[in-house]
Image: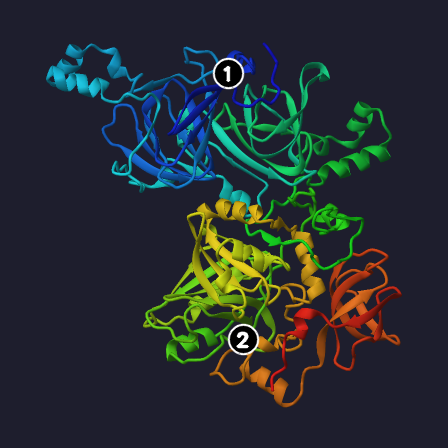
């Protein structure tokens, strides 16, 4: 077997035209395709590009890497056409002999990669396609009299049917030619989404015949893997049967090593975006993400593959006993124990959230454990990165991330629905606030009449318990027929459940979780307004916090609001998943730079924005958290109102949230003392340099004041300071 398996881009343009193009990997650059009877191709459909109906002599799986596509499917011996609309992140198996057509009804390009086996193909290492129509269609091969007799046509009509379409493969349709744009059946019967599982925090999503029966028919399985920079996208593993793996680099890049017979290195090379390589059966492979991270789509030549793991939680090294490894490796028992302990650790990272914050340079100077981004000066928290894994993408190739927010206690709130039921008017939605950057729930409340605030206004509103303990802060936008709420991921389930409990039968209200259909970006920094003006969104500049409007950027609809979530300055942009890439590119083209999650967390702490599970827990009430702008004593009855009224009336707030400058690193949860007496607790920390010092947030008894010195944990000194976000909160008068 020819083991030239190094990553390659598609080397042959089978067809290129106004409608798009089809590109193939061939045995000329990847000989293993022919010897292993595999094949791979890439279909690019421009706007209104149409791939003519055809069938292939191979089983394959198509994966959408960009845009969306309408697909028509007609299985052999069937007169029923199935139409499905697939989008970025969807995979669709195509059985051998199934007739299919592909149409791009969107504004941008649609790109699909096809990987599969070619054991029955006439052309070694390639898919052979048989078109029903067009310049190379099967009808062209029959004589006119045969076509006329086969279909009962007159010779002139037969000639038109066979030769009317002058184009091969792909055609760009005119605007008056209408193909189906909506699914005529359950999409889940014919396609499956891989990206959704990745977005929910799973580093690897695999679909096999056990989960999707159609894969048993095609004899293939598929997987999507995403890894942050410096992390393994594929830990050392091998197939336990005669299973080939075809791996395509969707985004980013990294280094791949494959080890074959007799421990020989079969491959040690860079794998870059849009390249594909093959892993032979039983060969061990490991893939390390590069500085841009990596995303991989793979197809295996088994519907139910099994893998032997050489690292991770189910590693063979972990299973083998210590004496066996001492003898096998010829090392000391102590080293074996260290080795076994190390291979238990999960080396993959948590993938980046789809809700990606931006900043525009000039982020306030913040502490750093080792270094900063050379372009945007973003802080890189190496110690945090090692502990939780991470992903960051910018021109400076920064790395780091922040942990997902811990879950919070059960939440209850009545005010929003009280206002709905009684149709009161007012200027705010009240009871609480806090909207962390890792927002993953966007709930829409719909009803016939709702007049709390005017359309296109917005504010922050909090969810609290009956004793006014703060659960979360929601960012609320009032729309014509809905209120959109953005909350943190750890509280979204309980908040949705709570709201449903307070909807009565007669209330014309519906709660929808639209997280998976939307994306949200935060734009902040001194150049934010300039970028807004460059994108023709400048009429929002200078408007009150929460003001929002609907726009279009590069033909994509979106909603933009004033406020950057951790500040009343900046902007928040919400759009559909389909529009996210276009909007992302438009922002980058205007000079926006992707801000890492850990840098965002650092900025949150420096600004003093409380977060669920840290400053917002069942230990502290909403006024101790300093959220004065999010509560009201002038509204009707709501959960926690009685407690808040007592706190204000009797001056019962006993502690408050402070910023704290630290002399050394300290752990969140550390006790804060003055003269040996406990006065508070540290809740959040960001590491720093000798120049700027470490910084944190802490609850301290109300007797404290700006500049007070305190002791944290084991002799670490701290100084209490004001933070911008809490200074913006004005106590109730």
Residue 179 image position (x, y, % from top left):
28, 36
Quarter of the figure that contains the N terminus: top right
Cβ atoms under marks 2 and 1 closer than 8 Å: no
Q: Residues within 10 Å of mark 2 (few under 14, many from 20)?
A: many
| Residue 444 seen in render | yes
Label 2: state its secondary structure.
Answer: loop
Residue 188 image position (x, y, % from top left):
38, 40
The correct choice, above or below, for 276 with respect to 690 in the image is: above
Residue 629 image position (x, y, % from top left):
58, 76
Residue 480 image position (x, y, % from top left):
37, 67
Label 1: state its secondary structure.
Answer: loop
Q: Which residue is mark 1?
A: 26
Answer with the quarter of the image where residue 269 lies: top right
Quarter of the figure that contains the C terminus: bottom right
Judge left or right: residue 270 versus residue 541.
right
Q: Which comes sooner in the sequence, label 2 or label 1?
A: 1
What is the number of the mark on residue 431?
A: 2
| Residue 440 seen in render | no
Which residue: 54% across, 24% down? 246
What whole-number distance in Å separates the C-alpha atoms at marks 2 and 1? 63 Å
Which residue: 33% across, 29% down? 101
Q: Nearer the viewer, mark 2 or mark 1?
A: 1
- Nearer to us in this view, 606 or 235: 606
The correct choice, above or below, for 503 with respect to 291 in the image is: below
- Nearer to us in this view, 424 or 593: 593
Q: Residues within 10 Å of mark 1 (few under 14, many from 20)?
A: many
């Amino acid at each position: 077997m020819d083991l030239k398996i190094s990553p390659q881009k598609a080397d042959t343009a089978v067809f290129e035209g106004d409608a798009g193009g089809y590109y193939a990997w061939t045995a000329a650059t990847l000989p293993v395709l022919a010897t292993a009877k595999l094949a791979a191709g890439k279909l690019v459909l421009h706007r209104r590009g149409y791939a003519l109906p055809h069938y292939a002599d191979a089983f394959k799986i198509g994966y959408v890497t960009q845009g969306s596509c309408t697909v028509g499917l007609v299985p052999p011996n069937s007169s029923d056409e199935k139409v499905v609309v697939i989008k970025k992140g969807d995979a669709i198996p195509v059985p051998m002999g199934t007739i299919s057509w592909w149409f791009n009804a969107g504004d941008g390009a649609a790109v699909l990669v096809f990987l599969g086996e070619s054991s029955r193909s006439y052309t070694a290492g390639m898919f052979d396609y048989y078109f029903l129509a067009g310049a190379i269609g099967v009808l062209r091969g029959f004589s006119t009299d045969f076509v006329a007799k086969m279909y009962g046509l007159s010779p002139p009509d037969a000639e038109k049917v066979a030769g009317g379409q002058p184009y091969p493969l792909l055609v760009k349709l005119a605007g008056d030619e209408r193909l189906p744009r909506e699914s005529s059946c359950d999409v889940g019967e014919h396609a499956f989404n891989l990206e959704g599982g990745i977005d929910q925090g799973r580093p690897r999503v695999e679909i096999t015949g056990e989960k999707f029966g159609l894969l048993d028919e095609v004899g293939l399985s598929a997987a999507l893997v995403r890894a942050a920079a410096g992390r393994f996208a594929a830990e050392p593993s091998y197939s336990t049967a005669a299973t080939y793996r075809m791996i395509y680099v969707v985004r980013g890049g990294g280094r791949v090593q494959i080890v074959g017979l007799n421990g020989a290195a079969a491959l040690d090379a860079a794998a870059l975006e849009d390249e594909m390589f093959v892993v032979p059966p039983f060969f061990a492979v490991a893939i390390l993400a590069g500085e841009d991270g990596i995303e991989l789509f793979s197809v295996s030549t088994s519907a139910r593959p099994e893998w032997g793991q050489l690292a991770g939680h189910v590693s063979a090294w972990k299973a083998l006993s210590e004496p066996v490894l001492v003898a096998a490796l010829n090392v000391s028992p102590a080293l074996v124990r260290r080795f076994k302990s190390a291979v238990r650790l999960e080396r993959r990272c948590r993938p980046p959230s789809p809700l990606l914050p931006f900043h525009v340079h000039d982020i306030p100077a913040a502490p750093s454990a080792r270094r900063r981004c050379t372009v945007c000066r973003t802080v890189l928290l190496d110690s945090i990165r090692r502990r939780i894994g991470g992903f960051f993408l910018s021109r400076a190739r920064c790395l780091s991330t922040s942990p997902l927010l811990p879950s919070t206690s059960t939440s209850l709130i009545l005010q929003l629905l009280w206002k709905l039921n009684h149709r009161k008017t007012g200027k705010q939605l009240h009871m609480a606030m806090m909207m962390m950057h890792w927002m993953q729930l966007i709930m829409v409340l719909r009803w016939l009449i709702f007049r709390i605030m005017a359309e296109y206004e917005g504010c922050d509103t909090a969810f609290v318990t009956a004793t006014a303990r703060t659960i979360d802060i929601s960012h609320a936008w009032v729309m014509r027929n809905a209120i959109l709420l953005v909350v943190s991921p750890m509280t979204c389930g309980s908040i949705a459940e709570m709201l449903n409990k307070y909807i009565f039968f007669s209330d014309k209200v519906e709660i929808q979780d639209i997280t998976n259909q939307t994306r949200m970006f935060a734009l902040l920094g001194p150049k934010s307004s300039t970028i807004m003006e460059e994108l023709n969104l400048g009429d929002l500049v200078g408007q009150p916090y929460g003001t929002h409007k609907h726009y279009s950027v590069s033909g994509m609809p979106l909603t933009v609001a004033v406020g950057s979530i951790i500040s009343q300055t900046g902007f928040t942009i919400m759009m559909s998943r389909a529009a996210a890439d276009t909007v992302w590119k438009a922002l980058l083209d205007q000079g926006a730079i992707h801000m890492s999650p850990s840098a965002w967390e650092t900025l949150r702490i420096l600004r003093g924005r409380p977060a669920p599970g840290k400053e917002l827990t069942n230990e502290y009430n909403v006024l101790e958290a300093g959220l004065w702008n999010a509560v009201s004593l002038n509204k009707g009855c709501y959960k926690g109102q009685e407690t808040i009224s007592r706190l204000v009336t009797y001056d019962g707030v006993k502690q408050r949230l402070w910023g704290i400058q630290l002399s050394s690193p300290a752990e969140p949860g550390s006790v804060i003392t003055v003269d040996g007496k406990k006065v508070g607790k540290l809740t959040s920390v960001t590491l720093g340099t000798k120049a700027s010092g470490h910084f944190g947030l802490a609850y301290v008894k109300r007797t404290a004041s700006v500049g007070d010195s305190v002791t944290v944990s084991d002799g670490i000194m701290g100084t209490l300071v004001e933070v911008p976000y809490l200074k913006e909160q004005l106590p109730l008068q």
